[in-house]
Amino acid sequence: MKKLKKSLVLILVLIVTTMAAGCGGSQSSSEKKSDSSAKQEKAVTLTVSAAASLKDSMNEIKQLYAKDHPNVTITYNFGSSGTLQQQIEQGAPADVFLSASTKQMNALKDKNLLVNDTIADLLKNDVVLIVPKNSSSNVKSFNDLASDKVKKIALGEFKSVPAGQYAQQILTNLKLMDKVQPKAIFGKDVKEVLTWVETGNADAGIVYKTDALISKKVNIVATAPEDSHKAVIYPAAIIKASKNPTQAKDFLKFLSSDKAKAVFQKYGFKLGK
């Protein structure tokens, strides 16, 4: 009888030990799954509002960034800096803003819509005069825009397009505005100005050097004197209302990395501070 009791006790001990081991194994597996899930980064979509002149370079940078950050989807909103400024002021979703002028960035800063310590001068650019590749107008300088041979001159809108504002400064300082303005046709952004010259719908146009360099349909005939306009600076910053400030900060940091700098320089941009 005593032997039977001892046998039963041993059996019970073995059963309990086995169950405990099984539970422990199950718990360990659960913990592993939990740890694995924790390591998986949350999927995030960043909305980047950027000046139209940055379209080609930013699309290439987007591909580079995705290789190291597969959980982050970059959505671009390209347009004139003035239009983008207005959209942000009106509450349009945006995480990062890249402007083609300090004017629009300063306007948002004054309205307390930016994370101020993230504002940085990212890039610089030149302003150039272009003509169609097959042009017969013999335009070789800004002064030639006053010629009767030039019927239409494409410019960015003075009010909302930085490229147009720089053009306005150049034409005013070179004392050409009175002769050029009657011939002017105004584009909603610098890309539209470029297209009009490419297609021959304008005899000449004033755009950024970077836009002219990527086109095989136009020739650069002159670069605006540096003292004829304000410096073309591209500032960048995080929007205060961003829902993903951590990822936005990381993307902004990437724009100053060696990889991104190489892309910007490839498209003709000069580096900022």
Image (cartoon, rainbow, N blue to C red):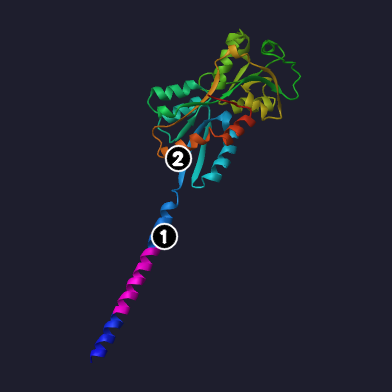
- In depth, the one of 248 and 146 nearer the eye is 248
Residue 175 in percent (x, y) is at 61, 7
Residue reaching furthest top? 175
Report, in whole angstroms, how far the alpha carbon at label 1 lies from the one at label 2.
25 Å
- Amino acid of disc 1: Lys
Number of other residues with Cα within 10 Å of mark 1, as a class: few under 14, some 14 to 19, many 20 or more: few
Answer above or below: position of 268 versus 24. above
Residue 112 in percent (x, y) is at 37, 26
Answer above or below: position of 126 versus 95. above
- In depth, the one of 246 and 187 nearer the eye is 246
Q: Secondary structure at mark 2?
A: helix
Q: Is residue 32 left or right of residue 137?
A: left
For the point 45% across and 40% down, which residue is it? 247
Residue under pointer 1:
33
Residue under pointer 2:
247
Residue interval drawn in magenta: 13-29
Residue 215 lies in the magenta-colored region: no
